[in-house]
Image (cartoon, grey):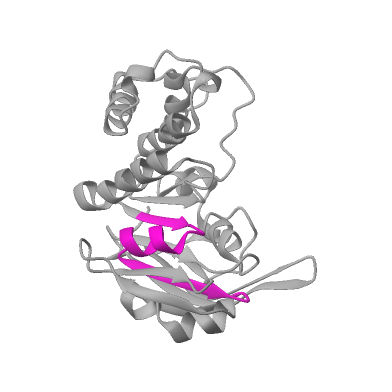
Amino acid sequence: MIAKSKHSIMVNNLNCILNDSNILKDITLSFEKGKFYSIVGPNGSGKTTLLKNILKLIEVEKNTVFIENNEITKLKSNELSKLVSYVPQNTNIEFNFSVFDIVMMGRNPYIKRFQAESKKDYEIAEKAMKTTNVWELKDRNINTLSGGERQRVIIARALAQSTDIILLDEPISQLDIHHQISVMNLLKELTEKMNITVITVIHDLNYAIQYSDYLVFLNNGKVFSCGKPDEVITNENLRRVYDMDFHIMNNPKTNKPIILPDF
């Protein structure tokens, strides 16, 4: 039976070696339910690898990753899919599925082999699409959508999976500013209105600062700093990680830092 915990995810002394390179080194973290986390850091710092370890897309050692108090190496893939959903960086779809078909794929962990979708599955998919404002697109070919529309569809698929945790890898990297803000607002609403834990890898520090409850700052495969944005984003931390100076100002609307590189 799948257990529950007050923490969505706990990572304990996680190491990851790929192609003889030590990508992650003694990572210890805990992620609180219903909070927005951004994993930030330079290229090659291990951000995506950390997500893939949590999702068991990369083999992990026993007793290093726990999702809702369940040690993930003991979970079957179907069980894990009922606990955490994933929005990958590459959301390209090779086949011409309808938007509704894509979202319904989020129900796969709950549908037995040779079993048809139930009325409940359709209702959950519809609710997910309305939450992400893509219901009107339900009959469209996924490959005819804009980047922002497609991203919302993939998030709807993750919502249809009915998990309390969503992991996203660079969800706004290929979007224009309007769709970037739209997607980030949506993710923030999921934490505030649905108590979903959102953990996203993101390169843009300012987006991470403004939307996140907590930042996980990785550097060279280690947790360099972790905490609230104003605790993590300091001149000293930025200089040590990026080897350059920044101007840090206050956003009067959010009362969070804004950073500008010192050109």
> Among all residues in the image, which is located at the extreme front?
263
Residue 125: % across, % down:
34, 27
In the displayed structure image, the side of residue 100 where residue 45 appears, left or right: right
**Furthest-top residue in view?**
139
Q: Residue at x 63, y 76 (%)?
A: 220
The answer to whether residue 23 of the structure is visible from this angle is yes
Residue at 49 percent of width and 58 percent of height: 201
* Residue placed most toward the observer, 208 or 134: 208
Q: Residue at x 40, y 39 (%)?
A: 179
Check the image and report above or below for 189 versus 114.
below
- Residue 61: image quadrant is bottom right
Q: Which residues are magenta?
A: 198-221
Which residue reaches farthest bottom?
A: 236
Residue 108 at x, y percent in the picture:
47, 31
Residue 120 painted magenta: no
- Please determine whether, in this image, residue 151 is positioned above or below residue 98: below
Locate the C terminus and report the quarter of the image it occupies.
Answer: bottom right
